[in-house]
Amino acid sequence: MGRATDPPAPAAAAAIEVSGLRKAYGEKVVLDGVDLSIPEGSIFALLGPNGAGKTTTVRILSTLVSADEGRARVAGHELGRADDAIRRAIGVTGQFSAVDGLLTGAENLVLMAELHHLGRRAGRRLAAELLRRFDLTEAGGMPAATYSGGMRRRLDLAMTLVGEPRIIFLDEPTTGLDPRSRRGMWEIIRGLVRGGVTVFLTTQYLEEADQLADRVAVLDHGELVAQGTPAELKRLVPGGHVLLRFADAAAWRAVARALGVGAADEETLTLQVPSDGSVRTLRSLLDVLDGANADVAELSVHTPDLDDVFLAVTGRPRGGDGACGREDAR
């Protein structure tokens, strides 16, 4: 009799489900049949060139504009039929700060609390908590106009959290921030997801998507041309390799003969061996090196990054075929 096994863990419910989303302005098609499924409590990153349709997607899903065709459910509610319920469940931080520069940080938060119909005492208490959470307590009494770019973006996101949204749309939230401020924003976003929030992120920074996202989709000419985890998308693009550098020419020649593949450079005593960077292929390579009894001075693994994916799948003429066109890397 077979041993009983635990049932598989149930899949996370979808925070956002999109099917056949289309939008055009006159003859210009902005979105052309977009399909998405984003699990609760995850970070989803939507990438694409300027004008690809990223912001339009956010505006439709956040009920700011209507789609021409297609269906979507956001936080369990049907888009176009339960928009008020969707608005109560989401928060939106756009490309441009919604902070009022004439008000202090605390006053901006209290004003937002009043718009959410919180009592004055509860609003002040929540404002103080959010200022603390976003490391703005000392600046809370200063006009927001005096804040740095990073401080304004943190305050903007804090204002989004006043309504305790289950889903947050972040439309290029770190544009214009210095590297330190950008990384600080990343930690805040990770903290939100640990608390159960779903984040829908659009960004121009490929490193940002790689660092944060559980799943990535690339939009080009209004079409999804690739989607999957960052690791899955990188495997769509050829060019990964292992670079070996040797201390002496004899070892270099022995390994070059044993492998029989790759680009050999006798001047630098290096070998560039095609590899997908997986543990299995690296183990096979190490076995060859052991068999050749070769002393390797340096070994480095080079795999395609999301920049390579982005360049490979975008920029083609509308409707053109490509190696990664309309792929789902599942």
Image (cartoon, helix red, strand yellow):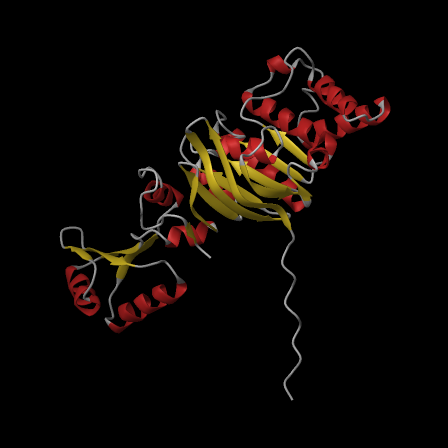
In this view, the residue farthest toward the bottom is: 1
Q: Position of residue 82 (x, y in %)?
A: 70, 37
Picture quarter containing residue 146? Answer: top right
In this view, the residue farthest toward the left is: 267
In this view, the residue farthest toward the top is: 102
Between 110 and 13, the residue placed more toward the observer is 13
Q: Position of residue 8 (x, y in %)?
A: 63, 67
Task: Report the residue at 45% width, 26% height from top.
Answer: 26
Picture quarter containing residue 139? Answer: top right
Would you say residue 168 is visible in this rendering?
yes
Q: Is residue 251 left or right of residue 19?
A: left
Q: Is residue 162 left or right of residue 155?
A: right
Figure check: 279 above or below 241: below
Task: Report the residue at 58% width, 29% height from top.
Answer: 65
Q: Position of residue 106 (x, y in %)?
A: 73, 20
Figure check: 101 above or below 288: above
Would you say residue 204 is visible in this rendering?
no
Between 7 and 269, the residue placed more toward the observer is 7
- Quarter holding the N terminus is bottom right
Q: Position of residue 313 (x, y in %)?
A: 35, 44
Q: Is residue 18 left or right of residue 128?
A: left
Figure check: 83 above or below 196: above
